[in-house]
Image (cartoon, helix red, strand yellow):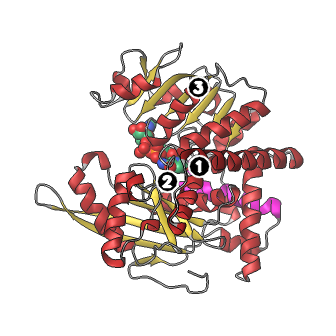
Amino acid sequence: MTKTEQVTPEGSESEHAIASRPDRAEKARDDMTPYEAATYFFHKSADRLELRDEMREVLGSTYRELAVQIPVRMDDGNIAVFRGYRIQHNGARGPYKGGIRYHESADLDEVRALAALMTWKNALIDVPFGGAKGGVQCDPRALSSAELERLTRRFTSMISYIIGVHRDIPAPDMGTNAQTMAWMIDAFGQKNGYTPGIVTGKPVELGGSQGREEATGRGVVMCTLEAAKRKDLQFEGARIAVQGFGNVGYWTAALASEQGASIVAVSDVGGGTYNRNGLDISKVFASLEDAESVTEFGDGDSVSNEELLELECDILIPAAIQGVIDGDNADEIKAPMVVEAANGPITPIADELLLERGLTIVPDILANTGGVTVSYFEWVQNIQEFRWEQKDVNAELQKRMSKATAEVFARSDKDTTSLREAAFDIAVSRVARADELRGYV
Ligand code: NAD
């Protein structure tokens, strides 16, 4: 869709929500909402880049927001009504792209924040996409597979007005997976015909890409290896703590351990497990066949999610939810390097506190771009109807992760800014330039 169409779809709650202005964004406090935190980093970048006011207004707000009610027949015969969102932040560089999250906290504000981060992420890793995000406010663990399928089908049909292969392409995020994408393809296809390119992160059997499932974790590890090299931190034998043991956390832990690091702790929503001599990640994974949580793993001591963040280790990788490192615990973080595999795990005030203490923070918009990069490869394969081999996917991913990491470090050195500031400055200038060239602003 071109930026000039400005369609207001049925059910649109607000077409163009105006975001925080700098005065609000200046509030470097922990009580910022996720969207305020995301726009805080944007406005700081806009100041450094001296963006024009109109450009700041366009990039500091979302293009389109669709909010829908999703009535779902539950297994017990009752109907439960959920709230779902699809938010498109900026489409200057290509079709909107971003995952769909099923989580209790996935409200309008959180999905807005994640949509904006996708715009910066896609620009930084230089894939031809704009930024979007979707979410359904629910606890997926409390729903049966049949209930999840009904919810997904209904949600897909409700957002079908604004998604499309060249318009907006969803993918998995927290609480969703390849199976969710398979239901989405089927629901969308019932109306529109066979359209594998409508989502990415789908099963390989339905046109998914080799290597997509582990791509975010693989990208996190590639980026961490490069960052460690630049910071003279020996990766082999490095003690790494990973918060979150879902798609991103598991693959990050497994692949980092394959590269010789020692994963001393992992956790999930129930808590964590710690072993100072290193955990065998394949055994932790296998233990989940009979256990609800990694806390039940026999070869480790149990730790809380809060304790995990404060462990003595060389690299800390939050790979679960946002805002886990804040003003209260920033001074307790002992790892000299924090790699943001999750989106927004460090609040703005914690970011300042960690930087003051000289820690290296590898920001989310760089560290976790592996997933969307391989999603881009998947989309290309769907459009061309041509399959890549896994080794080609990994080689292309490595090229892009290395290039983006080098660009961020070089910019940070040149401007004496943090890695996050450098990453935002590169991304924001690219999107601003695209909007300028289109004549949109
Ligand atoms: P997932 O649902 O597969 O796993 C989430 C993990 O976090 C689970 O282990 C869960 O138990 C844990 N968790 C949930 N709530 C928690 C809490 N309050 N405290 C501690 N742990 C908690 O999700 P995922 O796809 O691995 O996504 C994890 C993070 O990575 C999210 O921030 C997501 O936005 C980000 N991310 C994901 C992708 C992707 O391709 N899946 C890409 C980029 C970024």
The kind of secondary structure element at disc 2 is loop
Which of marks 3 and 2 precedes in the sequence?
2
The amino acid pointed to by label 1 is Val
Residue 428 image-quadrant placement: bottom right
Q: Earlier in the sequence, mark 1 or mark 2?
A: 2
- The residue lying at 66 percent from left, 56 percent from top is 40
Please, is residue 217 above or below residue 358 in the view?
Answer: below
The answer to whether any part of residue 322 appears in the image is no
Mark 1, Cα crowd under 10 Å, few <14 / some 14-19 / many 20+, is some
**Which callout, 2 or 3, points to the residue nearer the camera?**
2
Residue 438 placement, left or right of 254: right
Are dots 1 and 3 in contact, CB under 8 Å? no
Q: Residue at x 39, y 74 (%)?
A: 160
What range of the chain is rendered magenta? 31-49
SS for dot 3: strand
| Disc 1 to disc 2: CB gap under 8 Å | yes
Q: Secondary structure at mark 1?
A: helix
What residue appears at the point 67 percent right and 66 percent down from the top-left corner?
Answer: 21
Residue 329 in the image, given as x and y percentages of width and height: 58, 32
Identify the residue under disc 1.
Answer: 393
Q: Amino acid at mark 2?
A: Ser
The quadrant where residue 311 appears: top right
Residue 44 is covered by the magenta coloring: yes
Q: Residue 240 got which mark?
A: 3
